[in-house]
Each structure stands twice: as C-alpha cells, then as structure tokens.
Image: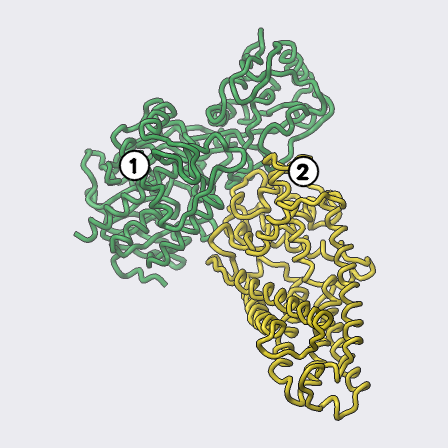
Chain colours: A yellow, B green
Amino acid sequence: MHGTKILDEADRLMTVCNSCRYCEGLCAVFPAMEMRRAFSDGDLNYLANLCHACGACYVDCQFSPPHEFNVNVPKTLAIARADSYAAYAWPRAFAGLFARNGLAISLIAAISVAAFIFGFAAVNDHAVLYGIHTGPGAFYALMPHNAMALLFGAAFLYVILALAMSLRAFWRDIGEPVGMKADAPSLWQAIRDAGELRYLDGGGVGCFNDDDQPTDRRRLYHHFTLYGFLLCFAATCVGTLYHYLLGREAPYAWWDLPVVLGTLGGIGLFVGPIGLLAAKRQRDAVLVDETRTGMDTAFTVMLLLTGVTGLAVLLWRDTNAMGPLLALHLGFVFALFITLPYGKFVHGLYRFAALVRYARERRMMAGGVAE
Amino acid sequence: MVDLNRKFDVLVIGGGNAALCAAISARRQGASVLVLEGAPKFYRGGNTRHTRNMRCAHDAATGILTGPYTEQEFWEDLQRVTGGETDEELARFMIAESKDILNWIVEQGVRWQPSLGGTLSLGRTNSFFLGGGRAMLNALYRTAEALGVEIMYDAEVIDLEIDNGMFLSATLKQRDGRISVRAAALVAAAGGFEANIEWLKQYWGEAADNFLIRGTPYNRGSILKMLLGKGVKEVGDPTQCHAVAIDARAPRFDGGIITRLDCVVFGIVVNRSAMRFYDEGEDIWPKRYAIWGRLVAGQPGQIAYIIFDSTVLTSFMPSLFPPIKANTIAELAGLLELDPAALERTVAGFNAAVRPGTFDHTVLDDCRTEGITPPKTHWARKLETPPYYAYPVRPGITFTYLGTRVNREARMLMKDGKPSANMFAAGEIMAGNVLGRGYAAGIGMTIGSVFGRVAGREAAKHARN
C-alpha cells in the first residue's frame, strides 16, 4: 500500500505494464519501470515526473478503457505528478497553494499588478506617471533602479531557495543521495533530452491530443514557450550585466542585445502559450488530469501575460503609456517569479531531475558508472 | 456514412493485420475497398492487438535485428515446429515474400524496434512493433483511411452469397434489419474460432468451459464456418488449438500477454489432487511454453498449480496477478484448496529425489531428479526456502488451426480442388496452410501480412478485369 490512492493505482498499472512491456520503445518511463519489480512511493513519483504526457501509451495499449484492466497511464501519472508538486513544496505551509492553483496564482498576480500600479502612482506624481520618458534611465524615472534591483533580487533569491529545497526533497524521495557526486554525462544527457523534448514524441510519430492522430504541435509550442522564457531570462541577465559592468542603463536601442533577446523571447512567450492553451482545450479529457487544468492554465497565462506586456512596453515605451505598461509588466513578472515554486513551473524542475536520474540509471545498467 | 448501395471492387471481412494489409494493398492497386470489422472500434483487429512482433527472413543484420535469418533457416524452423505439417510450396513462398514485408510494412506506417526486455532470444529473428500490436494496427488503419478505404465497425456479417465458388454478396446485420453488400471480390480475413466456446466443445467437450481465451470475444469463426459450409476446402486439424498455461485468475476473454506465466521450470506443477503429472524440466522456452496449455487441459477440472519457493521469485518475467503466498506447504495447500497432506507428500517426495547439480536456466542443465515419476529432468532444485508461492493455471487458447485452403495467390480452393473465381483468404483463417500445428513466435503476423498483401493485390486485379 502506498501513501495515496493514486499511487496505489500507479503501482497497479506499473505491474500490468511490467508484465507486458510493449510500450518499452515509446519513452523513458517504461525502460525505467523495467529496472524495478516493486515500486516505492519515490519510484512512482520518479516515473510520474519522467512521463512527458505524450499519450502514445494510451492509444497503443490493448488494455486501456473500456477494457476491464482499465490501463490509463498518462492520466494516472498526471494526477500523481501534480500531487507530487504539492508534496515537495517548500516551505510545507505553502503546499496548499497547489490545491486551487489557478485561483491562487490569479490572486497573487492581481495583487502584484495592483501593488505596482499603486506603488508607481503613490511615489510618482501624475505628470511623471503619464509623462514621456526617453533615453538612458527612462524606466528608473518611475522606479529607482536600486529599488527595482532590491525587490526583484530578493524575490529571485527566495525563489531559488524554495526551488532548491523542493528539488532536494524530490531527489531524496526518488532515492538518490543529496550529495550525489557530479555526474556530468548524465547531466548533459538530461539537458539534451529536455532541450529537444525527446520523450514528447510518442516514440517518433508525435504526441496525441484530441484523437488518435498524432501530431507534433504540443512539442512545437512548448519549444516556443521554453525558449521564449529562456531568451527573456537571458535578456534580463544581459541587461543586469550592462548596468553593473558597463554602466549602460536601460532602455536600450531596438538592436541592442537585451532588446533583441527580449523581443524574440517575448514572441516565443506570445506564440507558445497561446498554442499550448489551444492544444490544452482540445486535448482528449481521457488523457489528462482535469482537476488540475487551473494549474496548467495559470502558469501558461502568466507566461503569456509576461510576454505580451513586455512586448507592449517595447512598442509603446516612447509614449505616455509607458508608465502604466511598465507597472503592469513588472507586476506580472514579479508574480510569475514569486509563484514559480508553487505552480506548474516546477514540472520542468522535477522532470529534468528525473531525466538526470534516468540517464544515470541507464549508464549504471550499461556498466558505465561505478557505484 | 458508407454508401452500401454501391458495388465495391473488394470487400474485406475482418479487421486485423491481414485484413488491413489486404485492404491497403487492394486500394493501392486502385480498387474501391470496404472493410467490415465485426468488433467495436476499441476491440478492432482480433488477435493482432495482442501481438508484438513478426518473423521475417533477412540476409543481414538490420538496425533492429541482430543478425541474418536466412530463408533456409526460417524454413527449417517452420518444419521443426510444425513437425512437417506445412504446405512446402506455400511456406517457401511466404518465407521468400517475408523479406520484402520488412520494408513494405514500414511503408504502411508501422514502425519497428529492437526486441523487448525479456525477449532477447528473438532479437535476431523477430522484428518488434514499436508500441506493440495495437500501435501497429493503429498505423495500418491510419494509412488505410488516408488512402480512402471505407471502414465499418460493429459490422457483423451473417451470411455470404456464394454461387459455385463465386462470391456475390455479403449480408450485413444492421440495427433495423439487414443489408446486402455487393463486391467484385472477397477477401476473408476474419480469424479463427477460438472464442467460440460452443464450437470448441465439439472437440473438447465440457472441458472447454474451463478454457480462457487470450484474445477478444469476437473471434467466433462465423465467416470460416460459412465458407466451409459453402464449398470451400478446409485445411488444418479442426480439433487443434494453440494453448498455453495462463493465470487461472485471468478474465474469460482478452487477458492478453500479461496473464502468461513462464515459471514452470523454476518449481513443480501439481493438479487438483496435488500430484505432479509431467516433467517440468523437459525443454527450454519457447517449446515448454506451448505444451503446458494442453497438459493442463488434460487434467481434472482443467486446472493446475505451479509451486515454487522464495529463492526463484524474481527469476522470471513478472505477470499481472501476484503469486499466492504461504509460510508452509500445508498452509499454501489450504489457500489453494488442495489436500495439505497430499501436497506435503508430493513436495517431500520431489525434494528427496533432487540430485545435486549446477543450476543454469538458460541451458539444459544437470539438475535433475532420480527415482520419481514423472521425473524433472532439468532445473530440479529442492523447494525448501519459505515463503512458498503458487500460481493457479488454466489453458489459455490463443488461436485455432482450422482454415480455408488457398493457393499462392491467396485464392481459396473449393472442395473439388478448383480455385475460386473471386474469393481470397489471409491471416489466421488460412494459417493452417503453412502452420498445420505448433507455433513459432511472430509467424502469425508473417502469415497475415504476406497473404494479406497478396490477397489484396489479387482481389484488386480480379475486380479490374
């Protein structure tokens, strides 16, 4: 017996699947399963987070519903996966944020945006807030750079701490020592697997969405989203380096590196989330954890709003709309960041860790790693 | 909606590998094709949905096959497993065609992968379907639909109009009556009759009530029966079926691969009277796998129990149901509702007869018994380390051998030996032509794809002329 009903069900399914193994070539979950005969809670959480939810094993399974064996691996692992996010949350007191995640994220976002708008209005007089600011330091007319850096720096550090603690709990639970010695080949393998979403392709045909016709569109939109996010993050990092190392203040010209990265990233965060939201709506309900739609949607919408408001700031930064738009953008970015440990973002963290472990297990089985 | 008033070039009855290969092949020749699958969409494909690989000849290793498997070697394997009950001309033709099937089936959207974990012994001879048999079927259906093949599910054919070896029409049952479906040629690819318990009882008597059917309940052999009743020549022993020992707790139908048990060699097998009845160490996989269904069918109540101890618990592939467990042999007997004293006697007698040896389950080792009947001639080790375990087993019927006689065009032959004008057969319904008895892993799919492709092509050719 396991900690939860869904882990009991996952255990039952893994026993069925381990007796069959037809899906072995579809993804990483089944080969990882075959390395075990019995499954601890940690093993099941590992497999749940290793699953990329492509849906191929459901469509290919001779025992999926309406068969009496009722094998639905994608849905079961999706529920177990979402449960695991709450279980590993740090501090524990915030685990409840996963319960009604869509509502929680919406409220935090609303409060954050409101705080920036009121903050801007409170510290700036009307003329400054709606004034036209151009040239280096224009943004800081509205919010001093040090205040911005302090606020976001503190939020960033907290987020890093919370994510690190959550990851530590996951890593422990799946049975890996916390102080695992650096295993560069496994890390590199996981970076490649995650970077190309290798296991979201149904073993080669594509993933399954609204019917039994495979496509690759979720993978494509996820690439837009992930790489858009990373480009935006890179833009912020380059901007910070410009500021402190080169003494160059934002805003920068359209051709300058932070703006180019941010623009490309913003486009990614526009196209990707819209595509993912549309795919999500169309997806066959039998494959997904319907009770967690709010969590998925909240994070995707936050990315979309971050991207859209960022692009808006770029487009209208020379007008008197810049002040309100900047407040809006910073509000969403702040909310996005502080909720990273308490929303769908963590899927990337745990899945990456699961991929590292999988790469490591594969190498150990092949005799490539001495224990 | 399919327009059933038109006359199709080719009517395919069935919905598995052979049927779809025939439909695709006929359609690629330009024929209009209607597929009538008797099962609902989820259960489409008959036994194909439970398959996982195909045996094809090849002259060199491929990306997924570890070495060559020549036509001659395939032929020798086939002769061995059938004990010579095969039509050499058809068998050699099929083996030769199988080489090209490796590529042709990929062109129809099916993807291969190397042999699955636990099946390394097939790595050289058999190509595995990525995602299994249902994934293979899904690919064939997608291709057929894209080509414009019409497909109907829950389409039960209740009669065939055949005049002097010439197919005229099929009668399709509909919610509100019946409708006649006309076509210029027929491909029958509707499987065997393993799910038809009443039919099995003709040969097995009441024992058939205790058989478990490994595939869907839709393999009722109704098309086979109609054809044989309307003048088509039969082939294969009607009394025979392929049976393996599967977990007695499996559902009556469609338990598939996950209820199979391959642990006979690791223990002893007793019947309802707690007596051993056959040498558990006679031969290695896969031969031993295929004889135990029949052996159990011959025991009272068609039930037996594989008994082993904790030393071998993880030595074989896991299966769906956990073994029944107890700390003593007597307690285990109680759980199995066997006579505890009898089971203790059997185990003690077996243990006393075990001679020392070096255990190796991959070869015919020297661990054997002396002085008991039946002996266990290999892999005999004492059952003495509790806890003890048991799996109850029953015969699991995979397929039947009775079929329609065909020639190398997959054209049915009539009782007078003359070829039918426009009727073709492919798959399990004619497997008995090349597989008169026995089994070799993946050969059913070879028969289905090769003869399906041929049948579709020849049917289309006939329809066009």
Residue situated furthest front in the rendering: A246
Label drawn at residue A38: 2
Residue B217 is at least partly visible in this image: no
Mark 2 burial class by Cα count in 10 Å: few <14, some 14-19, many 20+ = few
The type of residue carrying mark 1 is Thr
Which of B395 and A311 lies nearest the eye of the viewer? A311
The type of residue carrying mark 2 is Ala
At which x and y percent is residue A10?
A: 65, 47
At which x and y percent is residue A346?
A: 69, 59
At which x and y percent is residue A155?
A: 78, 67
Left or right, B207 with respect to A28, comes to: left
Q: Which residue is mark 1?
A: B404
At which x and y percent is residue B442?
A: 41, 35
Which of B190 and A199 lies nearest the eye of the viewer? A199
Q: Secondary structure at mark 2?
A: loop
In this rendering, the answer to whether B427 lies above or below A342 is above
Same chain under badges 1 and 2? The reply is no
